[in-house]
Image (spheres, rainbow, N blue to C red):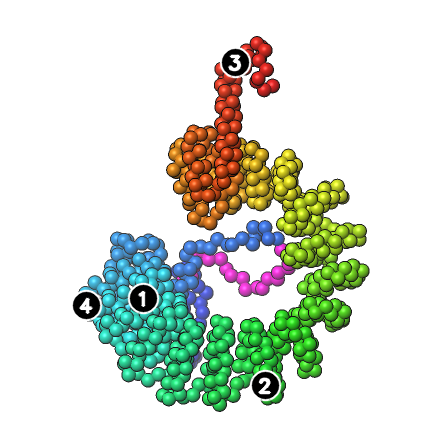
Amino acid sequence: MPPKTPPTNKLYFYYGHRKPTQNRPTVHGGLFTNRTTINPNKPPISTRPTSFNFDNWDPDSPQLAQPITDPSAHFFSVAQSLSPIARFIADSFRKHGQWGPQVVSDLNKLRRVTPKLVAEVLKVQDDPRLSSKFFHWAGKQKGYKHDFACYNALAYCLNRNNQFRAADQVPELMNMQGKAPTEKQFEILIRMHADANRGLRVYYVYEKMKKFGVRPRVFLYNRVLDALVKTNHVDLAMTVYDDFRTEGLVEESITYMILIKGLCKEGRMDEVFELLNQMREKLCRPDVFAYTAMVRVLVAEGNLDGCLRIWEEMLNDKVHPDVMAYSTLILGLCKGNRVLKGYELFKEMKEKKYLIDRVIYGSLIEAFVVEGKIGLACDLLKDLMDSGYRADLAIYNSLIKGLCCANHIEKAYKLFQVTVQEDLQPDFVTVNPMLVSYAESKNMDNFCKLLVEVQKLGFNVIDDLCKFFSDMVVKEDRVLTAVEVFDYLKLKEYSSVPIYNIIIEALYHIGEVHRALILFHELKNSHLEPDSSSYNNGIRCFTEIGDIQEACSCYNMIKQMSVVPSNEAYYSLVKGLCKTGDIDEAMMLIRDCLANVTSGPMEFKYSLAVLHVCKKNDAEKVIEVLDEMMQQGMLLDEVIYSAIVSGMCKHGTIDEARKVFTYLRDCKLLTEADLIVYDEILIDHTKKKTADLMLSGLKFFGLESKLKSKGCNLLPS
């Protein structure tokens, strides 16, 4: 039998993917290959897409919480790209966590660590302290010298871990170790700082380059200039540019544009035109893109005069503006209240048959409406539609508001109907100008008719009426009109607690406190339930008319709701209590306020400071607190004066309190009559405190019952 011939395609190495295990890693390719270990604890990743259903979504479900990742997961993901020895070193760093004898012992097992290996390890390290130790250990090997890749990797590692100041010292380290830094090392540092918007650090590295005698090339100069301009260090950029010219380097177009844009941002137009002249003489004439960039910077800074000067310069250079240049300048002029100049440029675009964007139409229409030129705005709307565009809701809103301001309410209503027909989904901004116009003209029939129409469109009429009344009461002369409108709407059952609160607060601010209280009582007697805002307004109104008992009742109602009163309500009630001589109750309310609100009135905080200083029984200390308060621009009122009375009666003496009030009279903060009043209050409060102290003593020693048994009628029952 003839022997069998062996197959010619017999393979001695497996060229493909073997199923990996913990002991046999995956092999990719031929004889010399990278080996990738696997994490035995890593769960298998399912590649099957999962569908998500919002109906079943529960935000409180524990399954949606952030998964707890294995701390070694990051290492295994990074280690796949490392060589075996680099992976061994990185694994040692991971296991021990810090530099120590264990790490050094692992490193000593290696015969030699090459510069390429050092750079490879540093590229994946996240611990700058450990990386620096490893870099220093590698440099002490016999016959070893770091190469440029090692230094660069160290700089990247330090910057990546926010140790950029240490990274800036890498050139000095290179110089100490006999390897002069080149332009590449400084470029790396400059690029790092520029990407992080650290302009001053960029300039620091640039100055260091000059100390090392490294001469930057043009592209690196451009990078330094760009970083300084972007971080608003234009003066430093001009200093660097002076060095650029001293070196005899030739500017590129990008060099000029970086400086010109920075000077435009600073508004230094004379220097801008000087650089433009240099650019024409030495290099080339700026194109339309360069001019558009300058206009965009000036528009962002609101320098419209500079924009127009640049525009004239562009025309003098016979550079024809394109659509983007026109659009940039027109939008800037419209925002800067120079719509007529923008309209001239718009007509130039029409003559040149440029394609005009709808945004330009919208900006011009809105600007014309602001200036009251409704006719021109309507002409632009017609032109917009003739050009084949469809006006958006913002354009219609602007026109409706302008027509209402010009008393053309009927035309505004027709435009509103157009928005409904075109299914533009009008909102409250669309309807509010018409509602205001109907209210001011007392045309309540059309007002209610419009409310019925918007209700059919799906509007929440009550919420929109709250917005309407909030807009109405912004101007004090329209508050009474808003009250009349509300009285009419109540008959149509268009009322709510928030609307009551808005009207009551507005009446309080214009001094119509009695009318505000009438509405407050009306709200309490209606089927509606007053909320905390209602009672806050009640506190302020009752305090204003001196009815402290009712104000305290409103305060108690707020407390029963488990709600904290507003700062204004607290301050008003405390001030009212101080006026009626209920000083102890006022001080207790101050503490209650500061204990419950995030930031209480400053008068309350200074009141507690006064009470604390009064414990020293020193008028000079109290005066220092008052002087500090006045330096902050605050006025002294009844609350502060009552705090002085309370503090001195409890911890000090009448004489020290009188010194404080005398000082205030000398500073003309108190009149002579006020001084007499507060002196009487001081005496009465002192007597009250003394009586309270005596009663407490009688009760403590059990003498109260004995005195009553002997017929004493002076003690309270």
- Looking at the rendering, the stretch of residues picked out in magenta corresponds to 35-57
Residue 569: numbered disc: none
The residue located at (76%, 51%) in the rendering is: 487
What secondary structure prevails in the magenta region? loop
Element type at mark 1: helix
Q: Which amino acid does label 1 sit on?
A: Ala
Q: Are marks 2 and 4 in contact (CB under 8 Å)?
A: no
The secondary structure type at the circle numbered 3 is loop
Nearest to the observer: residue 640 or residue 382: 640
N-terminal label among 3 and 2? 2
Q: Mark 3 points at which residue?
A: 703
Q: Position of residue 429 (x, y in %)?
A: 67, 64
Residue at x 36% of width, y 61% of height:
162
Q: For numbered disc 2, what is the local secondary structure?
A: helix
Give the mark, 2 or 1, whose residue is nearer the N terminus: 1
Q: What residue type is labelled 4?
A: Gly
